[in-house]
Amino acid sequence: MATAVHTTTGRLNLVRQAIEAFSRGAFVIVFDDESRENEGDLMVAAEHTDTAAMTYMLDHTSGVVCAALAYQRCTDLDLPQMVDDNSGLHGTAFTVSVDLIAGGTTGIPADERARTLQALADPAAQAADFARPGHVYPVRAARGGVLERDGHTEAAVDLSLLAGLSGVTTMCEVVRPDRAMARLGDLRELAEREGLHLISVGDVAAYRRAHASTSQSS
């Protein structure tokens, strides 16, 4: 039992460290269960996504860059679901894709995608600021976050909110140099080589539960 408690405490400390790094604009890798997607997403706060950050992300991922948004944020920006009948394997709640209109050309260059992501995190941004379709793919999180759905999207939004940020996170699936999907061993190697924090969706859920228990008992 003592070992289990120690292990749990250690995982929660890893999440705390990841949250602190994330709040400063660092990248974090979040992986899910092997029985689910068995993938890891490279994540960074949308408000910290500048051209350099976008370039780094494109170097290590599939390139289909998404923005995880809280449910209400999608409503505020009038971002409807991409399809009415979601038949995706995991029901990922993609909305219509967007580009920031101001200062944009095609929307695909790294600097333009970075500005689109920053705008999605800007509380002053409005629905009319974005062209649809575009080259950034917003994904709507479940209202209850990882405690409702154990997805990368929910972990991304929760990570941002726990860090005291906007609740909008830039994310994309990590791939290997041969462009195949990176699995846990690959993710560990990347995290060690690049000095990145590596946590799981389950870790974020455990952290939220632990903090909910602490809040209720205080």
Image (tube, rainbow, N blue to C red):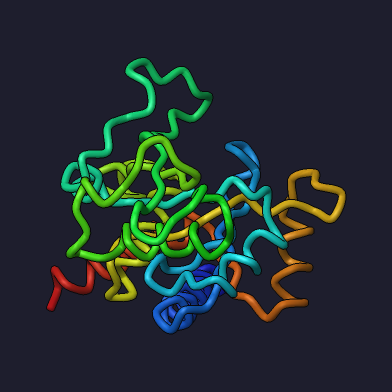
Where residue 3 sits in the image (x, y, percent)?
57, 73
Q: Is residue 16 visible?
A: yes
Between 11 and 141, which is closer to the camera in this rendering? Answer: 141
Total residue callouts: 0
Taking the image as shown, residue 25 lies to the left or right of residue 131, namely: right
Using the rendered view, name the quadrant where residue 29 is placed: bottom right
Where residue 88 sits in the image (x, y, percent)?
50, 23
Taking the image as shown, residue 55 lies to the left or right of residue 15, namely: right
Residue at the spot x=72%, y=55% of the render? 184
Between 74 and 8, which is closer to the camera in this rendering? Answer: 74
Q: Quadrant of the C terminus?
A: bottom left
Residue at the spot x=42%, y=48% of the render? 153
Residue at the spot x=77%, y=77% of the render? 193
Where residue 123 sits in the image (x, y, percent)?
19, 64
Q: Is residue 6 visible?
A: no
Say above or below: 210 vs 97: below
Residue at the spot x=38%, y=27% of the render? 82
Between 158 and 56, which is closer to the camera in this rendering? Answer: 56
